[in-house]
Image (cartoon, grey):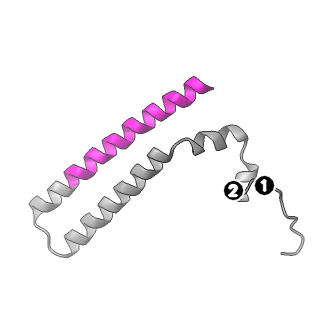
Amino acid sequence: MRGLEKVARPEGSSPAAANVPAMYRKLSERQPALDEQIVHIRGLVFIRMLLAGRGATPAELAECDHVIAGCRRELAELAVRSGARASAAA
C-alpha cells in the first residue's frame, strides 16, 4: 500500500496491537480461559438455536438454557478472578 510504512512488531501480533500500551497487551494475553469460555458459550447458544429451529421440545430448550446460564455464571466468576489477579499484579 502506498504511503504506509511497514511497522516493526513482534512475530504474530496484529498492526493494531502495535499501538496498544504494553500493560493492556499483557492483561489481554493472560486470559485464555475467558476466551475459551466465551467460545464455548457461543457454541452452546448456536446449538440451542439449531435445536429450536428443528423443533426441540420446550423441556429440551429449557435444559439448554440451564446449561448456558451455568456457563455464563462460570464466565462471570472467571472474569472476576482474572480482574482480581490483574489488580494485584499492577
Identify the residue at horizontal 52%, vertical 29% (top origin).
85
Measuring from the top left, give residue 77's x and y in whole percent: 37, 35
Residue 81 magenta-highlighted: yes
The C terminus sits in image quarter: top right
Q: Which residue is mark 2?
A: 13
Q: Are marks 1 and 2 in contact (CB under 8 Å)?
A: yes
**Label 1 neighbourhood size at 10 Å, few (<14), some (14-19), many (20+)?**
few
Measuring from the top left, give residue 82's x and y in whole percent: 48, 34
Q: Main secondary structure of the magenta part?
A: helix
Q: Is residue 44 above or below residue 75?
A: below
Residue 17 magenta-highlighted: no
Mark 1 element type: loop
Measuring from the top left, give residue 67's x and y in whole percent: 23, 51
Q: Which residue is at the front of the view, 29 or 70?
A: 29
**Label 2 neighbourhood size at 10 Å, few (<14), some (14-19), many (20+)?**
few
Q: Is residue 2 above or below residue 5?
A: below
Magenta stretch in the rendered image: 65-90
Q: CA distance from mark 1 to mark 2?
A: 7 Å
Identify the residue at horizontal 50%, vertical 47% (top origin).
32
Identify the residue at horizontal 34%, vertical 62% (top origin).
43
Identify the residue at horizontal 14%, vertical 69% (top origin).
56
Q: Which residue is mark 1?
A: 9
Mark 2 element type: loop
Query: Label 2 is placed on what type of residue?
Result: Ser
Residue that protrudes farthest toward the top in the picture: 88
